[in-house]
Amino acid sequence: MHPLAQRILAGDRRAVARALTVIENDAQDKRQLLQDLHPHAGRAHIIGFTGAPGAGKSTLVDQMIAHLRGQNLTVGVLAVDPSSPFTGGALLGDRVRMTRHSADAGVFIRSMGSRGSLGGLAAASREMLVALEAYGCDVVLLETVGVGQAELDVMSVADTVALVLTPGAGDHVQTAKAGIMEIADVFIVNKRELPGSEALVREVRLMVHERSHHREDWEPPVVAVSAIENAGIAELWNAISAHAAHLRSSGFWESRRRSRHRADTEQVLLAAFRAYVRGRASADAAWRVALDDPAADPYTAAAELLRGLPFDAAFDALFNRALAPRSP
Amino acid sequence: MHPLAQRILAGDRRAVARALTVIENDAQDKRQLLQDLHPHAGRAHIIGFTGAPGAGKSTLVDQMIAHLRGQNLTVGVLAVDPSSPFTGGALLGDRVRMTRHSADAGVFIRSMGSRGSLGGLAAASREMLVALEAYGCDVVLLETVGVGQAELDVMSVADTVALVLTPGAGDHVQTAKAGIMEIADVFIVNKRELPGSEALVREVRLMVHERSHHREDWEPPVVAVSAIENAGIAELWNAISAHAAHLRSSGFWESRRRSRHRADTEQVLLAAFRAYVRGRASADAAWRVALDDPAADPYTAAAELLRGLPFDAAFDALFNRALAPRSP
C-alpha cells in the first residue's frame, strides 16, 4: 500500500495535503495512491457552491463548515478557481478559513487553480475527492466561481449543486441562466439583509415553479441566508440534506456515482489512447508525417491513421461515424 | 463540394456566417465542409488579443480593423468568451463593431461562447479560422478574455499573441503573470493617456529584457497605444508585422502550423476513440459493467478494458506507461 494511503486511513491530516499534491502534479505514484484509497471513498456528500464573484461564497462556505462541525461532521473543502491558471495560496478566500480552522483535524481545506484541458479541473477534483473521502470527510464542500463551461464541469462532480445569488446584482439571474440555472439543486439567495432579497427569492421560486420538468423529480428549494450575519445556515443545511435524502431514496445517488465513474474511466482510456498516439508518432515515421503535415486536413489525416489500427471490424463503423467520413 | 464551401470561395459573406454555424453546432456536414475549405486555408496571419476584462480589447480590435482596412487587408474577427457558456449576440462588444463594419465585405466578425471540454474552444476556433481564411481574410483577430487555461488554449491558435495591459490596474502584471506573460509575443500598454502608463511600459520592458531565454528567439516589444484616441495603432501593427516576419524567416511560422495540425489531428483521433468507447459500451455488456461499476477504481477499470483491445504488442507498453499500472 502507498505509504500516504496508509497514513491517510490512519487519520494523518498532513498526509492528505501531500496526497493532494501528488494528484495535482500527476506524479508517477498517483495511480497506486488512488487505487489504495478507492475502496475507502465514495461515501461523502459532495456539495458544490457556485455563483458570480462577490456573491459571498467563501463566507457562506465558512459558515457551513462551522455549522457542520457543530453537528460533529468532518468537512473537506475544495476551492477550485478555473480563472486562475496555477494554484495560489489564497484562492477564493481560503487563507482566512485556513487560519480559523487550522487547529481542527475535522476540517481539511485545499484550493486549486486551473489545469490542462484533457480531463482538467473536473477529473482532478474527482481524484482529490477520493483522498478527502478516504480521510473520512462526511461532507465535501466544492467551491468554484461562475466562469462558463469550467464551472459546469466542476459542478458535475457534486451530488448537490447550490447556486449562490445575491439581491441587487440586477442582471444576475439573467447572466447565470445559461447552463448553471438548469443544474442547480438548491438556490441560495445570500445577503438577505439587503433590499431586494425577498423579490429575488420570489423571482427564483416562480422560475423554478413554472418549469414543466424537474431534473430527477426534484423541485429545487430557494433558501434565503445571510452568510455575514450567520443567519439561515441551519435551514440551508436542511434543504441540502433533504436533497441528498431524495437522491438516495430515488436511486439517483447511485446513478450519479455510476455516471461519474464512467466519465472518470473514459478519461483514463482517452489519456491512454493519447499516449499511444504520441508514442506511435515518435516511433513511426508514417504517423509522424500524417500528424505533422498540414497539407491534409485533420479529419483526412486522422481517418488514414485509424485505418491502420487493428480495431475489430464491428467497431470500425463507430470510428467512421465519429469522423463522419466523406466518400472519396 | 459542399455548397457553402463553393459560395465562400466565391466571396459570399453570408455563406461564411452559415459555415461558422455548421462548425459551432458540430453539424453532420461539418467534416465535408472543412475538407473542402482546407486547401484554401492556412495563409492568414492569426493575431490573438487577450487581457483582463476592461483592458480595452474590443476598442483596440475595432481600431485595428480600421487600420488594416486602410491598408486594403481583409479582416476576420473571432471573439471567444470562455466565461460565457453559450453564444450571445453581444459578446465582447461585437454588436458595436458589427454595426460599424456591416456594410464592408472586407470584414467578417463572429463571436462564440464556451463549448464542451474535449477539444473545446481552441479546436472550434481553429475550425472557424479555416472558414475565415478560405473566405480570403488576410488577417484574423482572435479576441478572448483572460480566464486561465481557456485563455491559454485559445491563444495557442494564434501566430502572434498580443497581451493588452493597462496602467493603474495595479496588480495586473502580477495577475497576468501566470502562463500568459510567457507566451505573449507583443505587449500592449493600452490607455497610454492615463497616468502610470510610462512606468508600466518601463516595468514590462525590464521584465522582458531580464529574461534569460526568449521563446523562438524573439524579444517581445512593448507598444503603448490609446485605443480610444486611436493613437499608436500604426506602431502596433508594425510590431505585430515584424513578429510575423520573424516567424517566417526563422521557420517558426511553419513549425507553429505543424504543431497546430498535430493538435487538431490528435483531437480528431481522440474524438473517434471516445466514440468507439461509447459505442462499445452500449453494445458490449462487459464494457458497460466496467464503465459503470464504481467498485473498481477508474485506472483498474480502464486497464482491464484496454487489455482486451487488439493494439499491437509493441505499443502495449505505451498504454501501460500512460496508466502507470500497479503490479497486482
Image (cartoon, coloured by chain):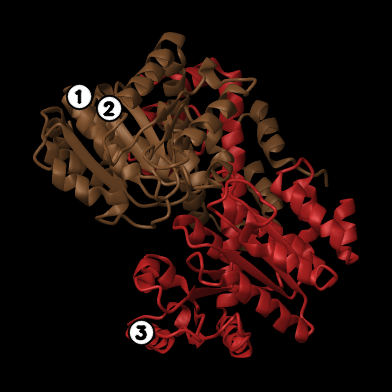
Chain colours: A brown, B red
In the depicted view, which residue is nearer to us: B275 or B61?
A: B61
Q: Which residue is mark 2?
A: A139
What is the C-alpha distance between the residues marked 3 and 1?
Answer: 50 Å
Identify which amino acid the numbered label 2 is placed on. Val
* Extreme-front residue of the structure: A195
Coordinates of residue B281 in the picture (x, y in percent): 56, 23
Coordinates of residue A245 in the picture (x, y in percent): 38, 14
* Mark number, residue A151: none
User: Hey, which quadrant is residue B249 in on the image?
Assistant: bottom right
Q: Earlier in the sequence, mark 2 or mark 1?
A: 1
Coordinates of residue A207 in the picture (x, y in percent): 59, 29
Q: Are marks 2 and 1 in contact (CB under 8 Å)?
A: yes
The chain holding disc 2 is A
Identify which amino acid the numbered label 1 is placed on. Leu
Mark 2 crowd level (few <14, some 14–19, many ≥20, 10 Å Cα):
many
Could you confirm whether marks 2 and 3 are on the same chain? no
Q: Which residue is mark 3?
A: B203
| Point 51% across, 86% down: residue | B193
